[in-house]
């Protein structure tokens, strides 16, 4: 169980980290502190504070689109050297992903893909885990993709990856993915309630579009 504790400030992140360890999480992860664009020394001290606060592994969550800046391969290597155990990579530059794998010299450092969109090519580079948004609605399909990639059945993996990309487009059909996931679950007879505001339920028109695309792929 990996719990995210990222915040704009170190104290809040440390408090959250201590709490989540106390209730039984096995790992924590954190984006670098966001809103302001911090320099590498501030980022290193931020993660040092998390490492000192808990006795469970700490991961970096690199999501430059939402944080506002990226963790470079060189900085990630420095973070690995102070004790960071892995990274969740939620960007779409496969060369940066490859640099993470090549340039982080720490043994047993985990590089985890933060999207279902490119697990097939990433698995060829050596990535062995991914965190898929669409897995919230269609976990079985993502297990099929994982198994095909890990067993080297690349012809089958290509077919599944293509299907996953179509469904991922469906998830983003309205721009915000969370309301679409709730609709997908509804069509699978899973009552997940309503998305948390400010996300709002989808219109009937959008709901029908999602339904048709799910039927087209045979997942419902």
Image (spheres, grey):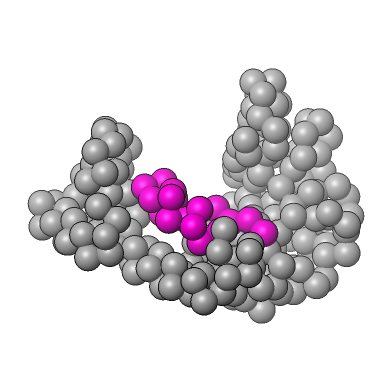
Furthest residue to the left? 204
Q: How many numbered marks, from 0 up? A: 0
Q: Is residue 75 left or right of residue 88?
A: right
Q: In which quarter of the image is residue 57?
A: top right
Q: Main secondary structure of the magenta part?
A: helix
Residue 173 in view of the camera: no
Residue visible at 88% across and 50% down in the picture: 82
Quadrant, the N terminus: top right
Q: Is residue 173 left or right of residue 137?
A: left
Indicate whether residue 30 is drawn in magenta.
no
Q: Range of the magenta residues?
A: 128-146
- In the rendering, at what x and y percent does residue 163 appear? 38, 68
Residue in front for this viewpoint, 56 or 19: 56
Q: Which residue is drawn at 49% across and 57% down?
A: 144
The answer to whether residue 126 is visible is: yes
Quadrant hosting residue 24: top right
Judged left or right of residue 3, residue 74 is right
Residue 167 position (above or below residue 55): below
Percent of width and height locating residue 161: 46, 69
Q: Is residue 46 left or right of residue 219?
A: right
Residue 86 coordinates in the image, percent (x, y): 74, 52
Residue name at image x 70 percent, y 26 percent: 21
> Which residue lies at the image location 70% right of the left edge and 37% below the top edge?
27
The residue furthest top is 22
């Amino acid at each position: 169980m990996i719990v995210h504790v990222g915040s704009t400030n170190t104290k809040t992140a440390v408090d959250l980290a201590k709490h989540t360890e106390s209730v039984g999480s096995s790992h924590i992860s954190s984006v670098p502190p966001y809103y302001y664009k911090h320099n590498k020394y501030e980022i290193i001290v931020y993660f040092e504070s998390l490492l000192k606060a808990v006795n469970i592994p700490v991961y970096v969550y690199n999501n430059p689109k939402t944080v506002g800046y990226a963790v470079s391969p060189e900085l990630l290597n420095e973070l690995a050297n102070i004790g960071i155990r892995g990274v969740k990579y939620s960007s779409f530059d496969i060369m940066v992903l490859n640099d993470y794998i090549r340039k982080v010299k720490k043994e047993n450092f985990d590089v985890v893909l933060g999207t279902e969109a490119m697990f097939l090519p990433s698995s060829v580079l050596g990535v062995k885990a991914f965190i898929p948004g669409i897995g919230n609605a269609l976990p079985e399909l993502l297990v099929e993709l994982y198994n095909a990639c890990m067993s080297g059945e690349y012809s089958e993996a290509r077919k599944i990856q293509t299907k996953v990309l179509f469904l991922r487009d469906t998830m983003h059909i309205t721009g915000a993915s969370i309301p679409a996931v709730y609709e997908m679950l509804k069509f699978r007879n899973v009552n997940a309630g309503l998305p948390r505001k400010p996300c709002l339920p989808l219109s009937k028109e959008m709901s029908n579009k999602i339904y048709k695309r799910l039927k087209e792929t045979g997942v419902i």
